[in-house]
Amino acid sequence: DPESGPARRPAPDCSPGGGPPPGAGGGARHAGALGEPVIRLEGREKVTGAARYAADHAAEVPLEDRAYAWPVPATIARGRILSVDPGPALAGPGVVAVLSHENAPRLTDADDATLLVLQSPRVAHRGQCVALAVAETLEAARAAAAAVRVVYEAEPHDAAFRPDHPGLYAPDTANAGEATDRIHGDPDRAYEEARFRVEAEYLVPPLHNHPLEPHAATARWSGGRLRVYDSSQGTTVVGRTLATLFGLAEESVTVVSEHVGGGFGSKGTPRPHVVLAALAARETGRPVTLALPRMLLPSLTGHRPFTAHRVRLGADGEGRLTSLEHAVTTYSSTVAEYTEQAATPGRHLYAVPNSRTTHRVTRLDVATPSWMRAPGGCPGAFALESALDELAVACELDPVELRLRNDTAEEPDSGLPYSSRRLADCLRSGADRFGWWGRDPRPGTRTEGRLLIGTGVASSTHPALAQPAVAEAHAAPGGGYRVRIAAADIGTGARTVLTQIAADALGAPLDRVRVEIGASDLPPAPVAGGSTGTASWGWAVHQACRELLYALAEHGGAPPEAGLTVRADTTEEIAAVSDAWARRAFGAQFAEVAVDMDTGATRVRRLLGVFATGRILNPRTARSQFVGGMIMGLGMGLTEHSALDPEFGDFTEQDLAAYHVAGCADVVDVQAYWLPEEDSRLNPMGAKGIGEIGIVGTAAAITSAVYHATGIRVRELPVLPERLL
Ligand code: MOS
């Protein structure tokens, strides 16, 4: 196993009054302790097929009178529905109902207009759900959906994005509350006066999340209560949203997401499928399962929007940045505003006294974009890190050396010191491991037969934040513990790592601790998103377990007959976290490519990443996150792209036959390493989120390697063969 050792240090003492709580194990380490490569606790269930996903509950939970639903997608990009004729559909065998805006139960606005399905005759984009067929079987529902007759009045639409689209405007904020514009100093003048200058435009096409498990939900109403099995990154928010939409008390809704087959952001907010399933179940009085066909995911579950980037860099004679400008233009739908925060990397990565980073968005008649792994930071780093590589060429400086010269101890945008920042160490360590040093910078000079070989590098960063959560810890007579929190394991290993955190805080062996997650009737928790899951849930779990030890001590060290339960809420702790530090994770990726001079085909022969992300809590699951992120970045670099069809207003790539996710044969050699990093300022575990940073710099490392191999600068992703010929 090639990983560097995980950081070994005692957990910071966050207990009240100092000193470990009584009975905390006296520093003894147990098998499966924090930092050990514990195998996923549900691994056997998953590989044997026993693990139930949202749609599986339809078959395995006794749901008498179960029905299946299939959506009818709009076939126009803009306009209104004149009529919905369910007659031919209802005549089919086993068809139970056809829902449309004419008969669907009314919903209350829950601040996400994409969820107000079947409420209005307006059509805002092609693929929007305009009706829903419900039938005894999946096949009957699908046939019925095809038989629903919808008559539209089409209106002229605009589904063509241009970097200078006339509808561009400055939103109040970009996604995640990031500032729309940030300006420091005088970037124009500094650029004019710079010794070295680079100005270039970069394009990142629409990208789709396409988790392996498509979005699915099974909904059942009984006695005014709603129970839903959903595929979601967070049951608390889905439960609260459904309660608002259907006018219910929060306690009347239960959402269960026991296992989730990936999300990558597309399951980070409630999606229309869960609302449709609940509407259909209410209307028909039967339990209803809706599993979205893969081809409807791009229109209904969010996507990474097209981003156009104009980057200008100025540097002095030593290669130190004097001016940085990153202007991003992108689009959202007419339904909701979403602005990919892609100009943000320049606010965090390098020391630069003069900078301007801006976002502009326009509204098109298209599906609503949303979160996809490292929103903003990922496409933004492609542009900025590509420009850094171009600057390295202009300055005749090694690209690693250029980045080292622009390292900073203070966050350029906020002026705050970093709670920890080891970007330079990641670059140096990666360069050592990769065999970077001594690289001949001249492009097109290294060949193997008809192959051109090149190497490239890029930096990565991602916020390291935490959100409030509640956890409950219970001690049973006999020495067992149970911890409950509405966390989500979307394939990351969260269930396993939270069990390790609990066992560590309790000073107990792993097999004495059972962690329950994945349901909205557990103590409320934030989503698995923004790489905040482990930090947020782990903090609450840690706190509940420590408080349980204090409570146990008051009972003489053993729980009473009925057991002992405590609840911890980190809202106050997180509100009290000092604003004195900039909190981010850092990393560096290195790529080696081979380009076939005859076909233009590019292979990534090696990818190597080194990350500094606080304490690594489980090296086995952590490695999967880093490697998985880098593989997704490999797909972004070489194969993944989608296009909006201006004529029809829909994506031309809707399924996995047309949208090419990197396959096993594309992934030759991907290695992830990490550096020990102490950061007790973040949370009791000293951990930074690791789910997203792996993708951030990867595509830029690949395109820079392609430039080194061929002398061709690919500024529009992905590196398609025709772009090299
Ligand atoms: Mo992730 S894109 O923050 O759900």
Image: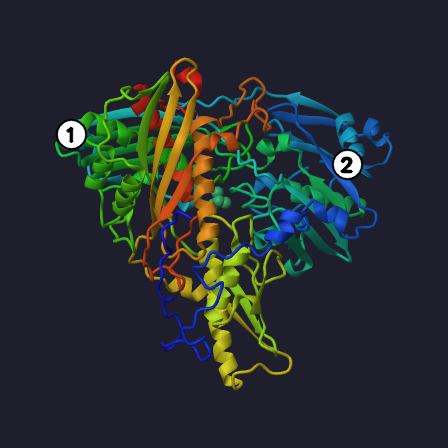
Compared to residue 607, the image places residue 108 above or below, namely: below
Percent from the top left, x then y, of residue 632?
47, 36
Work out whether mark 1 precedes mark 2 in sequence or the reverse, and give the earlier one. 2
Task: Determine whether label 1 and label 2 are within 8 Å by CB.
Answer: no
Label of residue 194 in the image:
1
Label of residue 538 in the image:
none
On the rendered structure, is 483 left or right of 98?
left
On the rendered structure, is 552 left or right of 117?
left
Q: The C terminus appears in which quarter of the rendering? A: top left
Look at 46% across and 69% down and name the residue there.
Answer: 505
Q: Amino acid at mark 2?
A: Leu
Q: Amino acid at mark 1?
A: Ala
On the rendered structure, is 113 left or right of 456?
right
Label of residue 138 in the image:
2
* Of residues 303 and 106, the one drawn nearer to the viewer in this rendering: 303
Percent from the top left, x then y, of residue 214?
62, 39
Assign a secondary structure to mark 2.
helix
| Residue 181, visible in the rendered structure | no
Percent from the top left, x then y, of residue 302?
54, 36
